[in-house]
């Protein structure tokens, strides 16, 4: 646990020491803020006390931002050779992966935090004040966080595949998009995709099947990451 | 702790980078690992530090071996990789704190140990900078710091002095000798004088195979079958015929007007006779130099490579 924590701290520090964290959080907040309050169809225009807009735009912003967070996780270590430094320390591949993964989902979580203000703003704008479907909103937040967690796991996987960050990013973006939406095109396979589960959680009902889906998706992506890392050492 | 390498082989595709290599390093010994570029030094070290799995064979450090107890081995080994990869955007202290945590050193332990190794490696003036801002020599010291922070019993250094200036080389060598007093050290180099300066024992490998394993002062003797004497006379016109007739002298070469190279059997010492002949010819010897074989010549002879590596 100590080892995971030290990797986690190093990763979070490097997010905030470089511009990555600020750019990701900034772009996310400005982006969803515009959709929410400014662009045509915003909440002030529709006069509807609902946070649906945030949860519709969120997945698409994450599609770009989460792979951008994770693209350097392994690609950079492989390119600069620091992976050799890490791999010869008394820590396992799992601890490295978990440390990096936790750091990535922390950033996802951190970028979601400020949007809670929207909830209080909407709540006070409501008629009567406080007229909001709080249960559905909490569910949607959990859904969005889970979604970001899956994206992060996919991003880590693609980062281990290449020593080139751009390739890791584009591959990550593509895979995230693929698993998010592509399965919606096929009638019987809707449940394989992320979107169906995301929408299901967003309704405010936390179903164990959805939970299991998210957890196993993340687990599979991280196991794949470990396999890729192991193959590199041969 | 002693390191023992048993029938180690590593195959990349069709190339055998390491070929049935076996050796043992006792506790507290400093071993110089010598070989031309691409001889398999780095590969061997990467296997010992559990970065690469071997194709065949094993390495064990005391009761632990790389296949079954990689984490135990990594805990006990300090490793400086060849190109010394570091996180350039981290500060020196931040980096060492991070490494200390990875080695599971407690807070008090880190607080004591980090200034200690910074002092030891002479990093003092640069310790508040970002690693990316440091020169190569100081980065190398940071690399040594991370290898030493947990006070490992075994130290593996892959070309620790490559790319440093002469002063830094001397410093680093001094440091290796210093820490090597109570640790098992394996360091690689292709600079022969360096191995001579630091190690007690040398292991020469070539194309993955061991070609020599001996104490540093013995290595030279391995290929020493003749002595060369360089002599400079005051006046020209020295008649070398008498010298050539001396027992044991194989040939004489003139390398200047008054400068000669005399080759003779290693067992006989012709200097006394040479002086006599000189007196008889009413000449004066300005300089007389007996050259023993250098490690470099031994190395070239053993590895059979034509190009000079150092």
Image: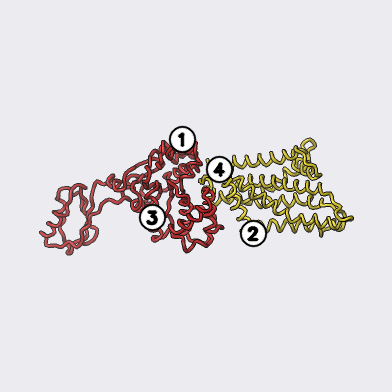
Say which residue label 3 marks.
B173
C-alpha span from label 3 to label 1: 33 Å
Q: Is residue B109 above or below residue B49?
A: below
Going from N to C along the chain, the mark reached first, 2 or 4, is 2
Q: What residue is rendered at 89% in x and 55% in y? A: A128
Say which residue label 4 marks.
A92
User: Which x, y percent locates residue B113?
Assistant: 47, 54
User: Which x, y percent locates residue B159?
Assistant: 43, 51
Are labels 3 and 1 assigned to the same chain? yes
Q: On what subunit does the disc labeled 2 rest?
A: A
Q: Quadrant of residue A198?
A: top right
Q: Tally the marks.
A: 4
Tell me the mark number nearer the camera, choosing from 2 and 4: 4
Query: Which numbered disc covers residue B56?
Result: 1
Q: On what subunit does the disc labeled 4 rest?
A: A
- Element type at mark 1: strand
């Amino acid at each position: 646990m100590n080892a995971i924590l030290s990797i986690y701290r190093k990763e979070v520090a490097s997010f905030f020491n470089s511009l990555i964290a600020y750019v990701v959080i900034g772009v996310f907040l400005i982006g969803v803020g515009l959709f929410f309050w400014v662009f045509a169809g915003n909440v002030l225009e529709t006069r509807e006390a609902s946070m649906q807009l945030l949860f519709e735009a969120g997945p698409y912003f994450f599609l770009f931002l989460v792979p951008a967070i994770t693209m350097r996780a392994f690609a950079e270590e492989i390119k600069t050779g620091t992976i050799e430094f890490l791999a010869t320390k008394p820590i396992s591949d799992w601890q490295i992966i978990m440390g990096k993964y936790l750091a990535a989902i922390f950033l996802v979580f951190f970028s979601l935090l400020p949007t809670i203000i929207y909830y209080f703003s909407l709540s006070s704008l409501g008629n009567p004040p406080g007229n909001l479907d709080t249960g559905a909103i909490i569910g949607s937040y959990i859904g969005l966080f889970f979604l970001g967690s899956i994206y992060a796991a996919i991003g880590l996987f693609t980062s281990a595949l290449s020593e080139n960050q751009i390739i890791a990013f584009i591959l990550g973006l593509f895979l995230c998009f693929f698993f998010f939406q592509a399965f919606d095109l096929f009638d019987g396979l809707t449940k394989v995709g992320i979107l169906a589960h995301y929408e299901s959680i967003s309704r405010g009902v936390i179903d164990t099947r959805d939970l299991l889906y998210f957890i196993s998706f993340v687990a599979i992506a991280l196991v794949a990451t470990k396999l890729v890392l192991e193959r590199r050492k041969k | 702790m002693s390191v023992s390498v048993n029938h180690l082989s590593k195959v990349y595709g069709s190339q055998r980078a390491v070929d049935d290599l076996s050796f043992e390093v006792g506790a507290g010994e400093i071993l110089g690992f010598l070989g031309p570029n691409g001889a398999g030094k780095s590969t061997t070290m990467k296997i010992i530090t559990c970065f690469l799995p071997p194709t065949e064979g094993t390495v064990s450090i005391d009761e632990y071996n790389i296949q079954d107890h990689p984490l135990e081995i990594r805990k006990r080994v300090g490793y400086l990789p060849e190109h010394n990869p570091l996180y350039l955007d981290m500060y020196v202290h931040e980096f060492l704190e991070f490494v200390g945590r990875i080695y599971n050193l407690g807070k008090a332990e880190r607080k004591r140990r980090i200034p200690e190794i910074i002092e030891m490696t002479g990093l003092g003036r640069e310790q508040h900078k970002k690693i990316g801002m440091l020169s190569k020599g100081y980065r190398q010291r940071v690399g040594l710091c991370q290898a030493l922070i947990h006070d490992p019993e075994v130290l593996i250094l892959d070309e620790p002095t490559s790319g440093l200036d002469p002063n830094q080389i001397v410093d680093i060598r001094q440091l290796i000798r210093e820490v090597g007093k109570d640790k098992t050290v394996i360091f690689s180099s292709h600079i022969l004088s360096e191995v001579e300066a630091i190690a007690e024992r040398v292991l020469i490998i070539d194309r993955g195979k061991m070609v020599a394993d001996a104490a540093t002062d013995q290595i030279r003797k391995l290929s020493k079958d003749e002595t060369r004497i360089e002599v400079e006379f005051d006046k020209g016109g020295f008649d070398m015929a008498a010298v050539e007739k001396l027992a044991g002298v194989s040939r004489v070469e003139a390398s200047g007007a008054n400068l000669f190279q005399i080759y003779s059997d290693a067992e006989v010492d012709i200097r006394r006779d040479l002086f006599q002949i000189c007196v008889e010819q009413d000449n004066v010897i300005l300089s007389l130099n007996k050259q023993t074989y250098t490690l470099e010549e031994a190395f070239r002879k053993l590895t059979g490579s034509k190009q000079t590596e150092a």
